[in-house]
Amino acid sequence: MNKSDLVKSILKKNNKYKISEIENIVDLFFREIEKALTQRKRIEIRGFGSFFTKAREKRIGINPQNGKNIEIKKKIHPKFKMGKILFKKLNPK
């Protein structure tokens, strides 16, 4: 499912809003998540999961083309950990 599919799905369930309004709400939702992650904040949506960032320190890697050592710079990656309710829905007993 991509963003436009999400907008269409929300529109089917709640047709009192215009498609442009729903697009704005979805865009705003993702912008707020992006903004919080860039500030290294944690976003927790109860029952669904949490988004957070994790830093990978700089390290030495090997270039596969020539076998020489290269320095890989420090990077920050987004991470997601699913909540218990989502886990139980994906893994029923």
Image (cartoon, rainbow, N blue to C red):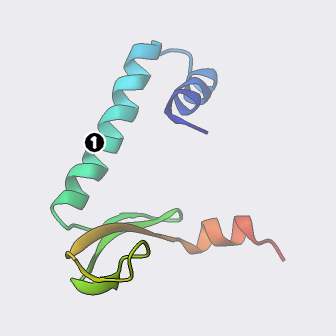
**Residue 25: image x %, image y %?**
36, 30
Badge 1: residue crowd in 10 Å (few <14, some 14–19, many ≥20): few
Vertical order, 60 against 40 (above or below)? below
* Residue located 19% across and 67% down the image: 40
Q: Return the residue at label 1.
A: 31
Q: Quadrant of residue 54?
A: bottom left
36 above or below 72? above
Answer with the quarter of the image where residue 66 lies.
bottom left
Q: Relative to residue 87, is residue 56 depicted above or below?
A: below
Question: Residue 93 occupies which quadrant of the picture?
Answer: bottom right
Looking at the rendered structure, the kind of residue marked 1 is Arg
The residue under the point 63% across, 22% down is 12
> Left or right: 70 with respect to 8?
left
Q: Residue furthest front?
A: 66
Q: Is residue 38 left or right of residue 85?
A: left
Residue 52, how many percent across, how many down?
33, 69
Residue beneath the point at 59% across and 74% down: 84
Residue 87: image location, x then y, percent: 65, 71
Total numbered circles: 1
Where is the N terminus found, in terms of image quarters?
top right
| Mark 1 residue element | helix
Task: State the residue lying farthest toward the left.
Answer: 39
In-front residue for pair 88/57: 57
- Left or right: 9 in relation to 35: right
Q: x, y (%) of residue 70?
A: 25, 80
Q: Nearer the viewer, residue 51 or 15?
A: 51
* Along the viewing direction, whichever of 62 and 3 lies nearer the viewer: 62
Closer to the camera, 54 or 24?
54
